[in-house]
Amino acid sequence: MLTTTTVRAETRSISIAAPPAVVLGYVGDPRCLPEWAPAFARGVRPDGEHWLVDTGEGELRIAVRVSPGHGTVDLLSADDPTRGAFTRVVANHGGSEYLFTLCFPEGTPEEAIEQQMTTVEAELETVRAHCEAS
């Protein structure tokens, strides 16, 4: 018998008055992470096919997987690609909708989840401001 388990997932989205290609180009460029996700990335540098993110508490090696055809940008742990941020840009009439999903390990305190998602909401506002100004 197949058993499936899940963990808590939280998704936030934001409407952006910019074409999907603009949004995808911005969030899909790891060098832009410190601009729109400064709580996560203080700095970013290439490491072969991966990226090293200075989190302020050390370095984290991530894989950035961009699929323009599917409108996805995933920011994943290079060591465990099932962990990370899973994002998608979809057309919303003349603009875009940007969706951002995080999965939290079992036992993550509710306060930690709320704090992380508040940070994500601020990051999405920054993405919108940048893309709409482009």
Image: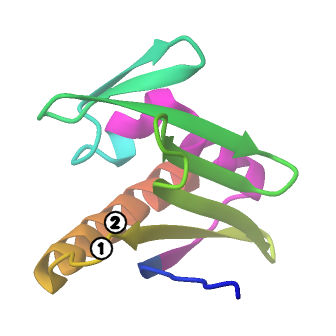
Location of mark 2 (residue): 120
Q: In the visual, does 40 lie left or right of 71?
A: left
Q: Amino acid at mark 1?
A: Met
Mark 2 touching mark 1, by CB under 8 A?
Answer: yes
Whether residue 28 is situated above or below residue 128 in the rendered picture: above
Q: Residue furthest front?
A: 1
Residue in front for this viewpoint, 92 or 80: 80
- Residue shown at 38%/56% (left/top)? 126
Residue 38's x, y, as percent? 26, 43
- Residue shown at 27%/45% (left/top)? 40
Residue in front for this viewpoint, 46 or 91: 46
Q: In the visual, does 61 lie left or right of 42?
A: right
Q: Amino acid at mark 2?
A: Val
Whether residue 52 is situated above or below residue 47 in the rendered picture: below
- Residue shown at 46%/27% (left/top)? 31
Q: Quadrant of residue 86?
A: bottom right
What is the distance, in whole Å, between disc 2 and disc 1 at their CAs?
5 Å
Whether residue 19 appears in magenta in the rendering, the answer is: yes
Residue 22's x, y, as percent? 69, 47
Residue 134 visible in this rendered orientation of the protein: no
Q: Pick the quarter of the image with the N terminus.
A: bottom right
Whether residue 66 is situated above or below residue 56 in the rendered picture: below
Disc 2 is placed on an element classified as: helix
Whether residue 67 appears in magenta in the rendering, the answer is: no
Q: Residues within 10 Å of mark 1 (few under 14, many from 20)?
A: some
Q: In the visual, does 13 lie left or right of 117?
A: right
Q: In the visual, does 34 lie left or right of 130?
A: left
Residue 19's x, y, as percent? 74, 57
Q: Pick the quarter of the image with the C terminus.
A: top right
- The stretch in magenta equals 12-34
> Which mark is on residue 37?
none
Location of mark 1 (residue): 117
